[in-house]
Amino acid sequence: MPEKNVELFSFKFSVYARIARIVLLEKGIAFETQEINPFAEDAPASYLDIHPFMRVPAIRHDDFTLYETSAITTYLDEAFEGPSLQPETPAERARMRQVMAIIDSYGYWPLVRKVFSERVFSPAFGEETDKAILSEGLEESAPVLAALEKLLSDKGYIAAASYSLADAHIIPMIDYFLMAPEGAVLFKNYPKLVRWWDRVKERQSTISTRPHLPT
Ligand SMILES: N[C@@H](CCC(=O)N[C@@H](CS)C(=O)NCC(=O)O)C(=O)O
């Protein structure tokens, strides 16, 4: 069974890189981090050999490199020992993958790039909030949260009675969304999601991976 030699290409504010970090911690996998800012104009061109779309995260495990977060987290879960992060039944595994796809396809842009970026990230770096983008983001986030509320398992975690890759996948985006006061107000409309968040917000892997924004 493979042990160490895992390198994570990560950016400290990235929600996707945080998903990979959470899974590495949940599995207890030792890893080293290489910090890459994919948004920087001077991002190293050599990184394109690892990720041709210049995004984070990517991993290198011995001589195997991989990008795309869901592929990375599934690989880490299957290639390493530690608690399984994929539920037992086909229906629960399908639900897990469905939630991951929903947040990627419909959630990331409104929750993170519109609400969090405009309301929290930009002001932290001295830029003004674009209120039109913020309100568009809140409007577009509501159906995503409603869909998650409807799909959430009654057993305690997103897809099953145990923590899975789906929980790890949505924690960073919900965490950022809740840092926006308007996001936190909207979130209260979804009682199952609120209960789920109360359960996962104090988890060690959630706390220790939370980015520190300038104040
Ligand atoms: N589909 C990719 C998305 C990764 C992604 O968008 N990462 C963001 C950071 S959270 C990024 O690198 N953005 C750089 C850019 O948009 O230029 C995955 O699942 O890994």
Image: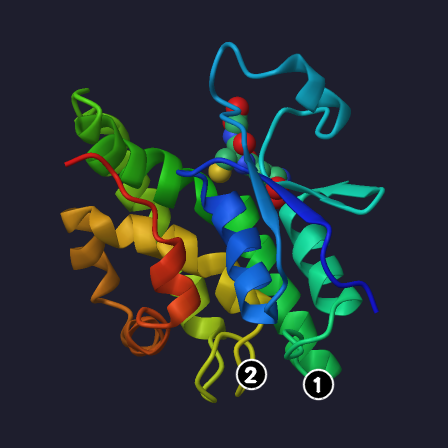
Q: Secondary structure at mark 2?
A: loop
Q: Please give left or right for residue 36 compared with residue 79 in the image.
A: left
Return the x and y of residue 95 as percentages of the image width and height: 62, 72
Residue 197 higher or lower than 128, as above or below:
below
Q: Are marks 2 and 1 in contact (CB under 8 Å)?
A: yes
Residue at the image position 26 percent from the left and 33 percent from the top: 121
Residue 45 higher or lower than 22, as above or below:
above
Instruction: Specify which label sits upstream in the sequence, 2 or 1.
Output: 1
Say whether residue 16 is visible: yes
| In front of the other: 18 or 135 | 18
Give me the disc on residue 88. 1
Q: Secondary structure at mark 1?
A: loop
What quarter of the picture does the N terminus occupy? bottom right
Return the x and y of residue 31 as percentages of the image width and height: 62, 52
Reading the image, the residue beneath label 2 is 160
Residue 15 higher or lower than 162, as above or below:
above
| In front of the other: 160 or 27 | 27
